[in-house]
Image: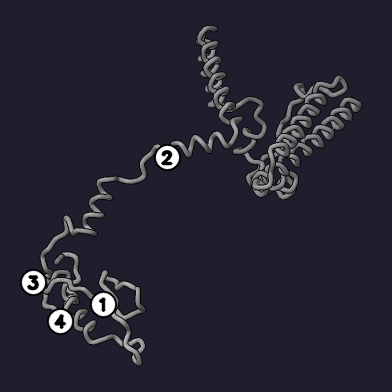
Amino acid sequence: SQREEKQLEAAVESLASRVAHVKNALHSFIYKLENEYERLTWPSVLDNFALLSGQLNTINKLLKNEKTPSFRNQVIIPLLLSPDRDDDLAKLTEQRVPVFSHEIVPDYLRTKPDPEVEEQEKQLSTEAARIGPEVAQKQIQTLNKLCSNLLEKLNNPRDDRDGESAAIRQNKPSFNPADTNALVGAVAFGKGLSKCRPPGPVAPGHPGQGPMMSGGPTLQQVTIGGGSGQQAGMGGPVAPQQQGQPGKMPSSIKTNIKSASGSMHPYNR
């Protein structure tokens, strides 16, 4: 009758309006998750979930209302199928369904899950039925224990976690004593280093540039001019500075430096 048709149209419009509200809430929540996740707080997330939950409960109440006609008794039959693009349909569905063809109608008008999904549900139901009450209770206790341990770790103060991390770092050695001793011996005494001279002639007039100058003179004491009471870099006494010649190096120092330049390498010590 016309009255039933009007009631059906009103119920469909009300249901479409409620679904539009749910869609807008989902769109807003997804936008926040993708673009405002740095400023998003957990209470705000809970508020969004509460909003969606309330809207879904409203739709369920609307469907269960006595004045709402039963949609289960209504049958949707496609009157026109075409492989061509339908602009009105695309605008109505926000460009999600541009074509109403034989290929997509079974998916959009399906009243049952896909056969693959139904098969998976049957397998899960069969596996759940095989588990006895005792095994199920053990699994529940194990899961509760894991959740309790996780919550306990999350609720611990941050200082305790930092202290445990610091203790772990202190107990774990960060160096190898053998490598340290080998490095000190190589630098201080030349242990483990090769004493062979590399091939190729040494340029004349530049003594001491090669890695090894075997047979050169031994390292001599070098004195550097300075104030009284200061000591030279090699541990010797400091000669008094000549007056009238500030900053000029005495000839004796030049001779000593020249004689020592060919034997500065630690390998000749």
Camera-nearest residue between 5 and 81: 5
Mark 3 or mark 1: which comes first in sequence?
A: 3
Label 3 vs label 1: CA separation? 24 Å
Horizontal and vertical percent for residue 57?
78, 27
Q: Which residue is mark 2?
A: 170
Label 3 vs label 2: CA separation? 50 Å
Asked if the residues shown at circle 2 and circle 4 are in contact, with their CB atoms under 8 angstroms apart, the answer is: no
**Secondary element type, mark 1:** loop
Q: Is residue 1 above or below residue 51?
A: above
- Which residue type carries mark 3? Gly
State which quarter of the image contains the N terminus. top right
In percent of the image, x 19 and y 79: which residue is there? 256
Horizontal and vertical percent for residue 83?
63, 45
Question: Which of the two discs, 3 and 1, sits closer to the camera?
Answer: 1
Horizontal and vertical percent for residue 24?
75, 42
Label 2 vs label 1: CA separation? 47 Å
Camera-nearest residue between 20 and 92: 20
Q: Which residue is mark 4?
A: 203
Numbered circle sitting on residue 215: 3
Q: Which residue is mark 1?
A: 223
Asked if the residues shown at circle 2 and circle 1 are in contact, with their CB atoms under 8 angstroms apart, the answer is: no
